């Protein structure tokens, strides 16, 4: 079977959901889930490599890749919020940020703008550097991988009656918890930073879509 970026993205989502389904089923299942998490993040890099190497990058493929990212990060943060390891506001933030930026990207695509190249949605150099550059995407993927793996290892090693490292002192456990909070909110902060250029440059497409709708409504009212 010839692998394409979209097939790799589909596999990545399946691996991510499988990993989340293993969390909470025992310490060794948690460790297996951590391994699958690393695999899912690695597949995220693989689909981009295939797209560039085989010249298969398309606007639709980019949207599918973004959709895969949204599904994985939302299911991970939602699970960890449900079991009380992160704040409930964390998955709410990721969902709201993703919905807003994807909505503006959709409006830009309707106006003929893609995510890269000369006709890209982002026109400023700093916007492209924060959103579309390889270092930014790689750093964000690495931060999410570190965050998910840290929480998974904490679940396997320190939480519950079947924890592999039971009997930890309260101070050590508090330090582990502090590390989780720092990692998750740093990841959220960088996620917000990467979304700011899309929000800043995307409002013009929203205003451009609202004006024709208002004009059409006014014409309809005048005709009736």
Image (tube, rainbow, N blue to C red):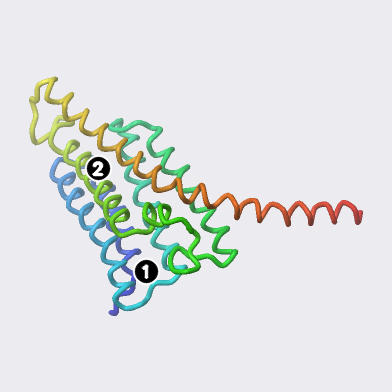
Q: Position of residue 3 (x, y in %)?
A: 29, 75
Say which quarter of the image contains residue 224. Answer: bottom right
Marks 2 and 1, the one that precedes in the sequence:
1
Judge depth for marks 2 and 1 and give the one in front: 2
Q: What residue did someone put label 2 on? A: 147
Residue at 17% of width from left, 46% of height from top? 29
Residue located 85% across and 55% down the image: 220
In the rendering, at what x and y percent does residue 161 appear? Answer: 14, 30
Q: Which residue is mark 1?
A: 6
Give the position of the N terminus as an image quadrant. bottom left
Q: Residue furthest front?
A: 125
* C-alpha distance separating marks 2 and 1: 25 Å
Q: Please tell me which residue lies in front, 149 or 82.
A: 149
Q: Residue 64 appears in which quarter of the rendering?
A: bottom left
**Crowding near the residue tagged with mark 1, few <14, some 14–19, many ≥20 C-alpha atoms within 10 Å:** many
Q: Secondary structure at mark 2?
A: helix
SS state under label 1: helix
Tell me what residue is drawn at x 34 percent, y 35 percent: 81
Label pair 2/1, CB-CB below 8 angstroms: no
Horizontal side, residue 152 vs residue 108: left or right: left
Marking on residue 129:
none
Percent coordinates x, y for residue 7 in the rendering: 34, 69
Quarter of image, res 149: top left
Seen from the viewer's position, the closer of residues 86 and 178 is 178
Residue 121's place in the image compared with 92, above or below, is below
Q: Position of residue 156 (x, y in %)?
A: 16, 39
């Amino acid at each position: 079977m010839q692998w394409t970026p979209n097939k790799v993205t589909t596999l990545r989502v399946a691996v991510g959901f499988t990993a989340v389904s293993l969390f909470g089923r025992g310490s060794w299942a948690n460790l297996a889930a951590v391994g699958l998490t690393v695999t899912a993040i690695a597949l995220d890099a693989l689909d981009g490599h295939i797209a560039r190497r085989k010249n298969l990058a398309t606007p639709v493929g980019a949207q599918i890749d973004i959709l895969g990212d949204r599904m994985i990060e939302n299911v991970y943060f939602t699970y960890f919020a449900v079991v009380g390891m992160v704040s409930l506001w964390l998955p709410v933030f990721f969902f709201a940020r993703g919905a807003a930026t994807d909505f503006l990207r959709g409006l830009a695509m309707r106006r003929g703008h893609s995510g890269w190249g000369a006709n890209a949605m982002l026109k400023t150099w700093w916007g492209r550097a924060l959103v579309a550059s390889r270092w930014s995407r790689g750093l964000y993927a690495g931060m999410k991988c570190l965050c998910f793996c840290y929480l998974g290892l904490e679940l396997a090693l320190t939480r519950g009656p079947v924890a592999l490292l039971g009997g930890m002192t309260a101070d050590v456990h508090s330090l582990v918890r502090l590390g989780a909070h720092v990692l998750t909110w740093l990841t959220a902060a960088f996620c917000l930073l990467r979304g700011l250029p899309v929000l800043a440059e995307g409002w013009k497409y929203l205003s451009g879509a609202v004006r024709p709708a208002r004009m059409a409504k006014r014409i309809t009212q005048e005709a009736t």
